[in-house]
Image (cartoon, grey):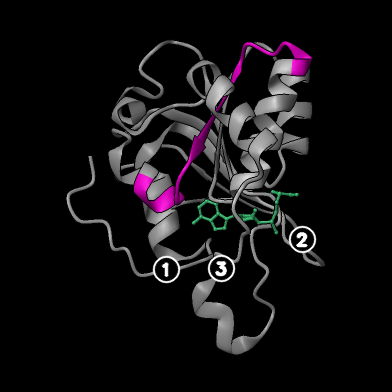
Amino acid sequence: MSAAYPREIRSYARRERPLGDAARAARERLWGRFAIADHEWPRIGEGCRDIVLDVGFGDGESLLTLAAADTARDYVGVEVYRAGLVKALRAIEQAGLTNVRVIEADVHDVFRLIPDQRIAVIQVFFPDPWPKTRHHKRRLVQGPFLREAARILRPGGCCIWPRTGRLMRTRCWRRPRRSRPWS
Ligand SMILES: C[S@@+](CC[C@H](N)C(=O)[O-])C[C@H]1O[C@@H](n2cnc3c(N)ncnc32)[C@H](O)[C@@H]1O
């Protein structure tokens, strides 16, 4: 596990309204079934099934679509946006999916508790609402993120991050702890 993972990147802005009564009730009802609590994060990926980690899944549309089409792998979504998380919880229940779980947290905190070489794929779809140069320091996918991704990916694992208006970037690691990434 990472000993000292810096907590310097604030890649999101918290401007959310509090959840309404119906959303709060749904969150409470579905949390135990579909969410992974922080004390369970160190156990992610300890089984033999491949884990796909979807970072910043928004309202969960792509996360659920991919998980439904790819039932041989388990999907874990991480998101800080509470309303999106509730929407995803409801959709997982409605779709009857058994291979998706969600985490409500900053992904940097989750990374810190995942042991080495546990994850098959890390996907980050359109992570950056930070187009201005002065905001580049807030971008999620940069040095510290990629270093932690390399640590928790299994040999041969990939990190993919499509960005609006740009080519999709992919980094794969043959031997995550020792090699430099190749694409
Ligand atoms: C532009 S949205 C993309 C949403 C979704 N992936 C999609 O393609 O529709 C970026 C998402 O990343 C989430 N996010 C940003 N930084 C994050 C972090 N450090 N940990 C977890 N989620 C984060 C934001 O809350 C937001 O929902």
Q: Is residue 157 left or right of residue 177?
A: right
Residue pictured at 43% horizontal, 57% vertical: 145
Label 1, label 2: how many angstroms apart (C-alpha)?
Answer: 23 Å
Q: Is residue 97 left or right of residue 54?
A: right
Label 3, label 1: how many angstroms apart (C-alpha)?
Answer: 11 Å
Q: Amino acid at mark 1?
A: Ile
Q: Nearer the viewer, residue 182 or 8?
A: 8
Q: Which residue is mark 1?
A: 9
Across and down, in percent, residue 178 comes to: 30, 45
Residue pictured at 77% horizontal, 60% vertical: 167
Q: Nearer the viewer, residue 99 or 83?
A: 83
- Classed neighbour count for the residue bearing mark 3: other residues with Cα under 10 Å, few (<14), some (14–19), many (≥20): few
Q: Which residue is mark 3?
A: 13
Q: Which residue is mark 2?
A: 167
Query: Is 63 colored magenta in this rendering?
Result: no
Query: Is 98 colored magenta in this rendering?
Result: yes
Label 2, label 3: how many angstroms apart (C-alpha)?
Answer: 25 Å
Q: Amino acid at mark 2?
A: Leu
Q: Is residue 90 left or right of residue 160?
A: right
Give the SS element for disc 3. Answer: loop
Which sits earlier in the primary sequence, circle 2 or circle 3?
Answer: 3
Residue 101, relative to residue 7: is it above or below? above
Q: Nearer the viewer, residue 143 or 94?
A: 94
> Is the residue marked 1 within 8 Å of ligand 1, measured from its CB?
yes
Q: Amino acid at mark 3?
A: Ala
Residue 102, relative to residue 127: is it above or below? above
State the extent of the magenta-drawn residues as a range.
94-109
Is residue 57 visible to the viewer in this orientation of the structure?
Answer: no
